[in-house]
């Protein structure tokens, strides 16, 4: 039977915003999240501050969660996943499973917000030694340190004197099959570089980059302050390998401005890992029969003017499950997906009447 | 703010190591296309003979390695540089009782010519490859490639053939005129993968203790940098972060493998360089490889698995030595080290007299009386010289 | 003009030494490498080639043995895929010599090249 309820899959920023928008407009959202708590990747990975405004991530996510958690128009399923879907808009029958039981729900439209996962630097074999050297970490690991106010070398527990970021790890790389730019890493690395300087004013911080992609206002909000106020050194050129020597990490690469190779000792190396579709994104694409692009992100079919419609009518996708996205993009797309999902169930209601 | 042990959290996160998952492989599985084309009658696929062994590859897929019934595609650079590289492979086969063919119906892959001079083209290279594969298929024995270059090149040829209908048609036409078929083996196997796959068996037959030996490894560029997805990567060795080839074999023999910072670099051979700019090759081999190993590890031996790498690393040290530089690391293939561990004769089988760098200290450390062994070889050569024997036979080699 | 040197070395060797790129490195005439064995052991090399247990050893030649018919099959492939035409673009004299050898051999083997 056609339903006016809307299923939202994923309780991260996009899912929370979609559920809230649906509820605010007087419809009912059924929100399914596989973890036992809401907040998505910012919560799971322990982000310290949001990009670009450096707002406390926990505080910001708690606000989003509060709008959904006790909302009478939102039915929450935590620790649950969607395991099956049948039917078509506005009459989908979806099976939701948790540790104890399976339950079928009838919904008129679906919004998928299953997001991304961070690139595993182990796949960049032979280059950066993430699993080999304790002092090679990722942006995500660095967020944890910043949040705890303990930026240290994992090998010694001591604060580093020299830190560098290596950009485009798992992005813009044909060899590993990820030719795309992950959009956010330049901004996040610069933001983390600022935070490191705030916490360790004497540390020297470097960023090795192909080109810095600072979208829109990020240029003024992060890039210039990082250089001018916090004295972060930006070096154009990609680091090609990391070695361990005399208790330090030796970063080798090529400075493409100076046109010469470099070898620089570092205490801590942060790999700016990019985005890949999460396991949930790949799974939902399969269950709902959605077309995926070559990188396995869910493909949206509306080009620039409709960023949320998928190949299946009534199923929408928002946020980083459709490709690399920053928070601003994800939240905007979630609102749009909510409107389009409501429009789908309303049209069905009108036709029926 | 409360204390958070972030370093412990991050370390424990890394502890399980990197997990390869075939689903996340950035490349297609060529088998899917290979078997589809076989179904469509476009080509014949020669299956890996049973019983085969399986080894893990870069993205967590499995590669089948034949145990025996192998057809040995020799390297055109070995015969005059390091023939013991091949004789050691054959000797191991014989010692383990494996059936194999050392064919005469095999040509050079001609890839060196192709890469270094560009006077060849895709149909020519593919036809030479398929002629060789077809010859192997006719014998019922499975091809195993001795040379890193041929191995890498054949995998590139396979890629081209699987994706280009027109090239398949051209090659099929040429094969027809030669009375042959378009045959591709189910796997393109490098001999060092076979050595790796049977390393435990080799270790079971080990008669020389090598636990006091320290070695460095040079993985051949054409082994792990060309069509890299079906090179051996094993979570047990380097956490699957670099190829396990050679290193896994040496570890099974109890050898202490040590790391050096330029392991990823080329040996210096570099194709064109060795031909048109040999001094560059020599300098690179010495300065970027041998001297770095010497300074960082000071190994007893360095081990690799390609013709060009063994010869370049070995035969580049003489000039530096003349200039009083810090060189002098014996260079061998994994097949030579494995055969030696199993008791093969250093000159009759390993043919180490063709090698250039002084390896006597290495033998002395192993407790092998190289003077006695050299005398045995000289006696065998005398018999050939006097006409008493025409060749050195396998029986002579073990005498 | 370095390229022709490179290719003439390889093409000539593959053609004239039995489809093998062979070593000259130990030979005195090639400006060889006096290694751990003192003087270049050119005289002994012929014997060393016979002192190899591999069945495809080739007495007196630094090559693996190859069937003449196999070699001609490879010549045939080179001829009809235009490898020698490509060679002619960079080294016409060498290409002429190679062509002559190839044509004789292929005719002898009964291959039609057109």
Image (cartoon, coloured by chain):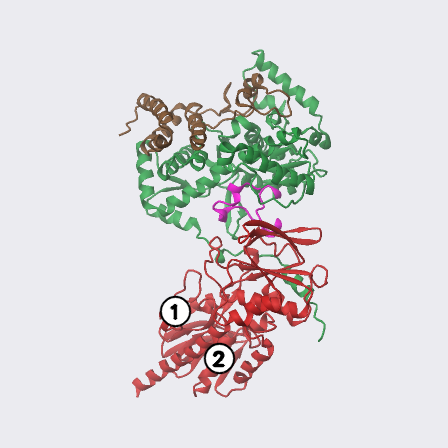
Chain colours: A red, B green, C brown
> B16 or C37, which is in the foreground?
C37
Stretch in magenta: B219-247
**Which residue corresponds to the image point at 51% horizontal and 18% vertical from the top-left?**
C60
| Residue A252 location (% of width, % of height) | 60, 51
Identify the secondary structure beneath mark 2.
helix
Mark 2 crowdedness (10 Å alpha carbons): few <14, some 14-19, many ≥20: many
Please, is residue A125 above or below residue B289 in the view?
below
Is A32 on the left-hand or right-hand side of B168?
A: right
The question of residue A82 being in magenta is answered with no
Magenta-colored stretch includes residue B238 = yes
Q: Viewed as shown, does residue A192 lie left or right of A327? A: right
Q: As rendered, which of B348 and C14 lies closer to the eye?
A: C14
Q: Does residue B229 lie above or below B393 as drawn?
A: below
Query: Mark 2 — on which chain does it sit?
Result: A
Residue B129 as seen in the image, left or right of residue A350:
right
- Say which residue label 2 marks: A17
Label drawn at residue A300: 1
- In the image, what residue occupies the spot 62% across and 38% down? B287
| Residue B234 visible from this viewpoint | no
Q: Position of residue A66 (x, y in %)?
A: 55, 84
Image quadrant where residue A40 sits: bottom right
Task: Tell me where residue A48 appears, x and y as whole percent.
Answer: 61, 72
* Residue B13 x/y as whole percent: 63, 63
Placement of the N terminus of chain C among the 4 image quadrants? top left
Of the 4 image quadrants, the one containing the C terminus of chain C is top left
Quarter-wise, where is residue B14 in the image?
bottom right
Residue C40 against residue B95 in the figure, above or below: above
Secondary structure of the residue carrying tag 1 is: loop
Query: Farthest left residue?
Result: C114
Counting residues from the start of the chain, the first of labels 2 and 1 encountered is 2
Residue A68 is labelled as none
């Amino acid at each position: 039977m056609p339903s006016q309820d809307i299923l939202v899959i994923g309780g991260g920023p996009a899912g929370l915003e979609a559920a809230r928008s649906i509820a605010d407009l007087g419809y009912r959202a059924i929100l399914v999240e596989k973890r036992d708590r809401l907040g998505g990747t910012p919560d799971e990975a322990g982000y310290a501050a949001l990009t670009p405004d450096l707002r406390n991530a926990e505080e910001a996510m708690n606000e989003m969660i509060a709008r959904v958690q006790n909302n009478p128009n939102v039915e929450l399923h935590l620790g649950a996943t969607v395991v099956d879907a049948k039917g078509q808009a506005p009459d989908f029958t979806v099976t939701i499973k948790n540790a104890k039981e399976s339950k079928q729900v009838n919904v008129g439209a679906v919004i998928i917000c299953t997001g991304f996962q961070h690139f595993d630097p182990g796949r960049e074999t032979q280059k950066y030694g993430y699993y080999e050297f304790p002092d090679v970490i990722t942006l995500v690991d660095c967020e944890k340190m910043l949040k705890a106010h303990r930026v240290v070398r994992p090998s010694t527990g001591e604060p580093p004197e020299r830190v560098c970021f290596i950009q485009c790890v798992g992005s813009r790389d044909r060899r590993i099959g990820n030719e795309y730019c992950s959009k956010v890493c330049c901004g996040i690395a610069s933001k983390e570089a600022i935070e490191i300087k705030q916490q360790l004013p004497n540390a020297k911080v470097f960023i090795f980059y192909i080109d810095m992609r600072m979208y829109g206002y990020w240029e003024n909000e992060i890039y210039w302050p990082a250089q001018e106020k916090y004295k972060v050194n930006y070096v154009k050129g990609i680091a090609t390998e990391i070695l361990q020597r005399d208790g330090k990490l030796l970063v080798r690469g090529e400075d493409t401005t100076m046109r010469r190779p470099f070898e620089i000792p570092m205490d801590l190396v942060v790999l700016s890992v990019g985005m890949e579709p999460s396991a949930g994104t790949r799974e939902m694409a399969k269950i709902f029969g959605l077309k995926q692009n070559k990188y396995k992100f869910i493909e949206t079919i509306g080009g620039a003017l409709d960023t949320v419609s998928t190949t299946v009518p009534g199923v929408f996708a928002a946020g980083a499950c459709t490709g690399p996205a920053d928070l601003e993009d994800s939240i905007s797309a979630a609102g749009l997906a909510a409107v389009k999902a409501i429009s789908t169930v309303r049209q069905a209601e009108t036709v029926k009447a | 703010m409360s204390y958070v042990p972030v370093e412990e959290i991050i370390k424990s996160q890394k502890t399980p190591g990197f997990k390869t998952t075939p689903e996340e492989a950035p490349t297609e599985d060529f088998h899917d296309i290979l078997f589809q084309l076989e179904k469509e009658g476009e080509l014949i696929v020669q299956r890996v003979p049973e019983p085969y062994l399986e080894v893990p590859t870069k993205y967590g897929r499995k590669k089948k390695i034949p145990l025996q019934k192998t057809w040995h595609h020799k390297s055109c650079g070995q015969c005059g540089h390091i023939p013991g590289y091949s004789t050691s492979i054959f000797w191991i086969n014989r010692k383990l009782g494996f059936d194999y063919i050392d064919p005469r119906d095999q040509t050079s892959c001609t890839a060196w010519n192709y890469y270094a001079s560009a006077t060849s083209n895709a149909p020519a290279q593919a036809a030479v490859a398929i002629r060789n594969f077809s010859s192997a298929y006719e014998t019922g024995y499975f091809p195993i490639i001795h040379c890193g270059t041929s191995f890498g090149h054949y995998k590139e040829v396979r890629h081209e053939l699987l994706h280009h209908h027109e090239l398949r048609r051209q090659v099929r036409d040429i094969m027809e005129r030669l009375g042959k078929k378009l045959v591709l083996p189910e796997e393109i196997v490098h001999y060092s993968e076979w050595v790796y796959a049977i390393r435990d068996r080799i270790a079971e037959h080990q008669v020389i203790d090598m636990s006091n030996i320290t070695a460095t490894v040079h993985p051949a560029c054409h082994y792990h940098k060309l069509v890299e997805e079906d090179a051996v990567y094993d979570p047990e060795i380097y956490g699957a972060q670099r190829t396990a080839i050679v290193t896994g074999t040496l570890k099974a023999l109890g050898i202490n493998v040590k790391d050096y910072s330029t392991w990823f670099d080329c040996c210096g051979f570099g194709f064109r360089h060795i031909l048109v700019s040999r001094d560059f090759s020599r300098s690179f081999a010495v300065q970027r490889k041998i001297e770095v190993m010497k300074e960082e590890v000071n190994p007893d031996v360095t081990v690799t698995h390609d013709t060009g790498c063994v010869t370049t690393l070995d035969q580049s040290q003489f000039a530096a030595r003349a200039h009083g530089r810090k060189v002098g690391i014996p260079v061998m293939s994994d097949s030579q080290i494995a055969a030696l561990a199993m008791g093969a004769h250093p000159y009759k089988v390993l043919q180490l007299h063709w090698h250039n760098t002084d390896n006597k200290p290495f033998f002395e450390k192993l407790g092998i009386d190289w003077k006695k062994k050299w005398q045995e070889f000289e006696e065998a050569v005398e018999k050939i010289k006097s006409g008493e024997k025409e060749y050195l036979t396998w029986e002579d080699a073990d005498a | 003009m370095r390229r022709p040197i490179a290719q003439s070395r390889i093409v000539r060797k593959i053609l004239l030494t039995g489809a093998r790129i062979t070593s000259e490195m130990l030979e005195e005439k090639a400006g060889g490498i006096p290694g751990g064995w003192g003087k270049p052991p050119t005289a002994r090399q012929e014997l060393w080639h016979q002192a190899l247990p591999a069945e495809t050893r080739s007495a007196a030649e630094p090559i693996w043995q190859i069937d003449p018919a196999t070699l001609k099959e490879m010549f045939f492939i080179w001829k009809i895929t235009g490898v020698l035409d490509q060679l002619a673009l960079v080294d016409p004299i060498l290409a002429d010599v190679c062509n002559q050898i190839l044509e004789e051999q292929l005719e002898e083997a009964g291959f039609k090249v057109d």
